[in-house]
Amino acid sequence: MIKFLTRIIFITTFVAFILFYIQPLSVFYKDDLKRIQNKKAITFVTRIGPTTVYEIKNRKTGYHYTIMKRFAEEMDLDLKIIIADNMKSAVKMIEERDADIMSGWGIDKDDKKLKYSYPYNRIDYTVVSKSSNLRRSNLSQFLKSNKVYTIQSDAVSSIIKKSGENSEYSFMVSPDKNIDELLKMLNENEIKLLLINSDEFKILSKYYSNLKAVEKLAINEPEAWALPSDIDKDLEEKISIFFKKMIQSNELSNIYSMFFKQQKYFFVGTKTFLNDLLNIFPRYEFFFKEASKSYGFDWRLIASIGYQESRWRQDAVSYTGVKGIMMLTLDTAKDLQIDDRVDPRNSIFGGTKYLRSILGRINTNIEESEKKWFAIAAYNIGLGHLNDAIILASKDGIKVTKWIDVEPYILKLSQSRYYKQTKYGYARGWETVKYVQNIRQYYDILVFLDSQDDKFEPKNKDIPSSL
């Protein structure tokens, strides 16, 4: 009898142990929604990248980030973002409820370890290379003899799996690198082929004109949030309702257009610039000259910044929510006590005053004639990121006195082995370098024209009647 009871106790204990460790975790996490509401915050885990999350003008932004933020607002919760180095870490975080939702890694429909939300976007996956690599008579051999590098994601794993052994490509997955780092390797000929998605290509090809598509390996692949396989049904339903509302209101489409259909950082070309100089600039010339005189700047420099920011459109609105000719953020406008950011005078005077305040905080070691380029970079990327780049340069023994000294380190802010050493983290440094480069080009054109004759001087110095 005692043996029988002992056996029963042993079996009961063993079964309880098995149930505790092996049964679906939903027993323990069945109140996901209530847990999130109690902590008053929703936590997303994502990756660093040009389409996920980054900072510009001291504000977080990004296509995927904007959708996360809208969900948090819809739920009346604070938004918390965790950046994971790789997908394995991200999956572990949502399984253990250190994060609630995973965003930005693509999906694998055959993966049963995770659940996925409504696919809110569709993308293609494209092999890209430098244009110089594709001008070859033996292109087929070139493609076969070089590996295609890519980041780690469920979508990429699925593509590689489907391509099979007969694929003309061989792949190298880099679990701890981001797209920016792989692109740098491509640009410096360390690698020859890279697999990126179509949204990344839309952004990056604007800044890297030698980036060319080779072949699409997957078309119309879904992007969705990854959720724990045992997610609370109430939370899953909230997510479904959110996406349904975003689709019906056309907000999803509008967010996509803001990020991928604007061409803000292109150099528009001399012909277009001259046309706008003749037809648009005269409306605001008085304000540019008066603001520049008030705050001690060359008016041609301030006009060049205004053109880069908005092409001198007073009603311009960026995907980040900045507005007006000088594209002031809401916070900056409040600090400057500006109520109407789209008013041309307010915007131009406000932007010039803000640039002057930045200039006053630029490192004193910088040559006086070079400080304006540092201030302009900080106007775009934020003073914190600029100082991060200067510190990175100093660690390499570089004494930063000119823009050319810090420019390579601005570019390094998108590479994990560098931005992990910094206070302010990842930044799209290549965007800021292009920003400064464009302004210098517009400025050079204005200086040249102004030195030739008074063709662009207004006959009437008063404020144009159109204002």
Image (cartoon, helix red, strand yellow):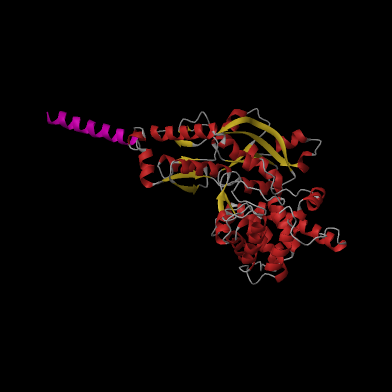
Query: Magenta residues?
Result: 1-21
What type of secondary structure mainly makes up the magenta span? helix
Whether residue 365 sits left or right of residue 65 in the image: it is: right
Q: Position of residue 454 (x, y in %)?
A: 86, 61
Q: Quadrant of residue 128?
A: top right
Q: Is residue 16 magenta?
A: yes
Q: Position of residue 231 (x, y in %)?
A: 40, 34
From the viewer's side, name the closer residue of 414 and 336. 336
Query: Given the current orientation, which residue lies at the most extreme left position?
Result: 1
Q: Position of residue 428 (x, y in %)?
A: 62, 51
Taking the spot 23% from the left edge, 31% from the top edge, the residue there is 11
From the viewer's side, name the closer residue of 196 and 117. 117
Is residue 155 in view? yes
Taking the spot 71% from the left edge, 62% from the top edge, the residue there is 404
Quarter the C terminus occupies? bottom right
Q: Position of residue 265 (x, y in %)?
A: 70, 49
Is residue 107 in view? no
Q: Is residue 276 magenta?
A: no
